[in-house]
Amino acid sequence: MKGFFQIWLIVGALVILIAGGAYYFGYDHGWEKSTNSQISQTPQPISPTPSPDASPAPTGAGETANWKTYTNTKAGYSIKYPDDYTLTVDNDLIYDGVPAVSIAPTTPTFPPSNYSISIATEKNSKNLSLSQPDKLFGIGPLIQYEKLPSNWNIKQTHLGDLPAVRVDHCCGGQYGIESEIKTIKGNLIYEIVVTPDYDPANTKQNDEFYKNLRNLNKKKDYENIISTFKFL
């Protein structure tokens, strides 16, 4: 019996030695590495990368870079125009000591086959404001008519860095008004008028007179010119 007990004692010791060696070997060569691997794979918080500014560049900014610049220090604005346009100071249209100006293609046609832009200022003697835009239209200085039709769409826009209001395809002028833009700065009302008018919704405007005005590049030209308007 004593011999049998000694055998079991030896077997038990061998089992403990083998198990201990296996644990040591596994921890040293496998389990520790596995644990480290799992730790390294744990997702780490990543600081967000600021997105680049997705704001589009100003319309026609590249095209207008080398245009001529007209500056009117008395009225407090500047505007740029391309080489194939001419700016004319109209001394026959002087408002409060400031003449109106017009920007038109250097080679004119009659009837006109391109758009021209006129700019004028006048004192805001009636203390008008952009909060009642319908009262700003039809009172000059460049265009005068009784009033806007009651259902006419008055658009919110900008002129230079100021809020402005605009109507398209409306009233007045020998050949109609393409666009009329108004804003107020200090005690001055600024008016820009684009003529002649071409309204694609008007089915009567299908004759030779309006053919060239259908060219979208011509619209782009005058919109780009107006986009260069800046207050001093």
Image (cartoon, grey):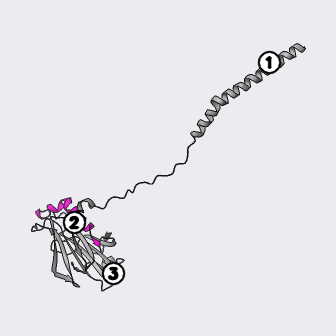
Pointer 2 local density, CA inside 10 Å: few below 14, some 14–19, many at least 20: some
**Residue placed under numbered mark 2 in the picture:** 222
**Residue placed under numbered mark 3 in the picture:** 186
Magenta-colored span: 205-231
Name the side, left or right, on which 53 lies relative to 166.
right
Which comes sooner in the sequence, label 1 or label 3? 1
Q: Please tell me which residue is depicted at 40% across the width and 55% down the height of the picture.
A: 52
Viewer-closest of 151 and 172: 172
Q: Please tell me which residue is depicted at 30% across the width and 83% down the height of the picture.
A: 124
Pointer 3 local density, CA inside 10 Å: few below 14, some 14–19, many at least 20: few
Label 2, label 1: how many angstroms apart (C-alpha)?
A: 102 Å
Secondary structure of the residue carrying tag 3 is: loop
Q: Quadrant of residue 77?
A: bottom left
Label 1, label 3: how many angstroms apart (C-alpha)?
A: 105 Å
Instruction: Give the residue type that dot 2 points to.
Output: Tyr
Viewer-closest of 72 and 59: 72
Image marks 1 and 3: residues in contact by CB distance under 8 Å: no
Residue 118 shows in this picture? yes
Tell me where residue 51 appears, x and y as whole percent: 43, 54
Q: Is residue 214 magenta?
A: yes
Label 3, label 2: how many angstroms apart (C-alpha)?
A: 26 Å
- Which tag is nearer the camera, tag 3 or tag 2? 3
Instruction: Give the residue type that dot 3 points to.
Output: Gly
Tell me where residue 161 appears, x and y as whole percent: 33, 70
Q: Please tell me which residue is depicted at 64% across the width and 33% down the height of the picture.
A: 32
Secondary structure of the residue carrying tag 1 is: helix
Q: Residue furthest left?
A: 110
Secondary structure of the residue carrying tag 2 is: helix
> How would you classify the magenta stretch by its main secondary structure?
helix
Please tell me the numbered disc located at residue 11. 1
Residue 148 shows in this picture? no
Instruction: Give the residue type that dot 1 points to.
Output: Val
